[in-house]
Image (cartoon, rainbow, N blue to C red):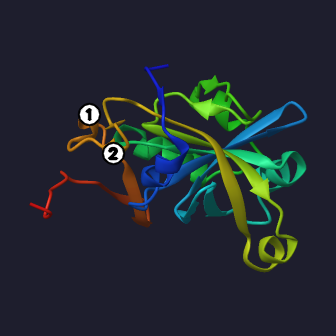
C-alpha cells in the first residue's frame, strides 16, 4: 500500500467536503464487501461525523448493520472503472475483492478493510438511528480514524494537484468528473 499518514480527526471532514464518490467497505462474520456511493458527506467536526446512503437491498447494508462499522475510501480517477464495476454488481452474487483483484488493508480501529490505491480513508462506527436508516437508507457514523496519501492530502488540506491523483465524482450513466486544480481567492 502506498504511504498513508493519519489525518487529524478534526480535519477529517475535509476528505469529503468536496463531495467525492466513495467506496464503502464493510466486513462481518468472515465476509467482506465493497460498494460505490455517490451520496456521502461530512456532518460534524467534533467528534467528526459522516453520512452515507446504503440501499437496504445490498450486502454492504447487511454487513454494516451486523457489524456497526464501515470505511469510506476515496478513489482517484485511476479507479473510476473499478468504482463503476463494484457499484454495478451485487456482493451477494460475486466476491468483488476476488473478481477485481482488490487488496484489503486492515483498518486500525475497525474490522472493515481499507482499499489499497485510494487517496483517503475514513474508519467509521455507526451511530444507530433506526428510523433514519429504515426510512431514508441513511447511515450516520462517527469517524474514529482517518488517513490520506500524503501526496494528495497533507497538513489538513488537499494538495493543489492532489499528487496527480484527483478524486472523482459520479454524474450518471457511467460518467464521472475529476476534481481540478485548486485555486485560492483569499489573497
CB contact under 8 Å: marks 2 and 1: no
Residue at 71%, 51% (x, y): give it.
90
Tell me if 56 is positioned left or right of 118 in this view: right
Q: Which mark sits nearer the N-terminus, 2 or 1?
A: 2
Q: Secondary structure at mark 1?
A: helix
What x and y, as percent, mark residue 99? 63, 32
Mark 2 = which residue?
157
Residue at x-position 91% and y-position 35%: 29
* Side of 114 where 132 appears, left or right: right
How many callouts does the rendering have? 2
Mark yes or no: residue 103 visible: yes
Q: Which residue is mark 1?
A: 163
Residue 33, percent from left and from top = 72, 41
Image quarter of residue 162: top left
- Please, which residue is most extreme toward the bottom here? 135
Relative to 99, residue 64 above or below: below
Q: CA distance from mark 2 to mark 1?
A: 12 Å
Which residue is most to the left?
187
| Quadrant occupied by the C terminus | bottom left
Q: Nearer the viewer, residue 170 or 7?
A: 7
Answer with the quarter of the image where residue 161 lies.
top left
50, above or below 83, in the image: below
Near mark 1 (Cα within 10 A), the count class, few <14, some 14-19 or many ≥20, is some
Q: Secondary structure at mark 2?
A: strand
In this rendered view, identify the residue nearer to me: 60 or 135: 135
Task: Locate residue 149 relative to residue 42 in the image: left or right.
Answer: left
Relative to the observer, which residue lies in front, 34 or 140?
140
Q: Which mark is residue 110?
A: none
Residue at the image position 59 percent from the left and 24 percent from the top: 103
Amino acid at each position: 500500500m502506498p504511504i498513508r499518514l493519519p489525518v487529524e480527526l478534526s480535519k477529517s471532514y475535509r476528505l469529503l467536503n468536496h463531495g467525492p464518490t466513495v467506496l464503502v467497505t464493510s466486513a462481518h462474520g468472515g465476509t467482506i464487501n465493497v460498494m460505490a456511493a455517490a451520496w456521502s458527506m461530512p456532518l460534524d467536526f467534533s467528534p467528526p461525523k459522516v453520512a452515507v446512503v446504503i440501499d437496504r437491498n445490498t450486502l454492504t447494508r447487511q454487513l454494516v448493520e451486523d457489524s456497526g462499522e464501515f470505511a469510506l475510501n476515496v478513489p482517484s480517477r485511476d479507479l473510476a472503472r473499478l468504482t463503476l464495476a463494484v457499484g454495478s454488481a451485487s456482493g451477494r452474487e460475486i466476491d468483488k475483492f476476488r473478481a477485481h483483484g482488490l487488496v484489503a488493508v486492515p483498518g486500525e480501529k475497525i474490522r472493515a478493510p481499507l482499499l489499497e490505491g485510494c487517496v483517503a480513508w475514513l474508519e467509521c462506527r455507526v451511530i444507530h438511528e433506526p428510523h433514519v436508516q429504515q426510512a431514508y437508507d441513511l447511515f450516520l457514523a462517527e469517524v474514529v480514524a482517518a488517513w490520506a496519501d500524503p501526496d494528495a492530502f497533507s497538513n489538513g488540506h488537499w494538495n493543489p494537484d492532489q499528487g496527480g491523483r484527483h478524486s472523482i465524482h459520479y454524474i450518471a450513466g457511467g460518467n464521472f468528473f475529476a476534481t481540478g486544480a485548486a485555486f485560492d481567492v483569499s489573497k
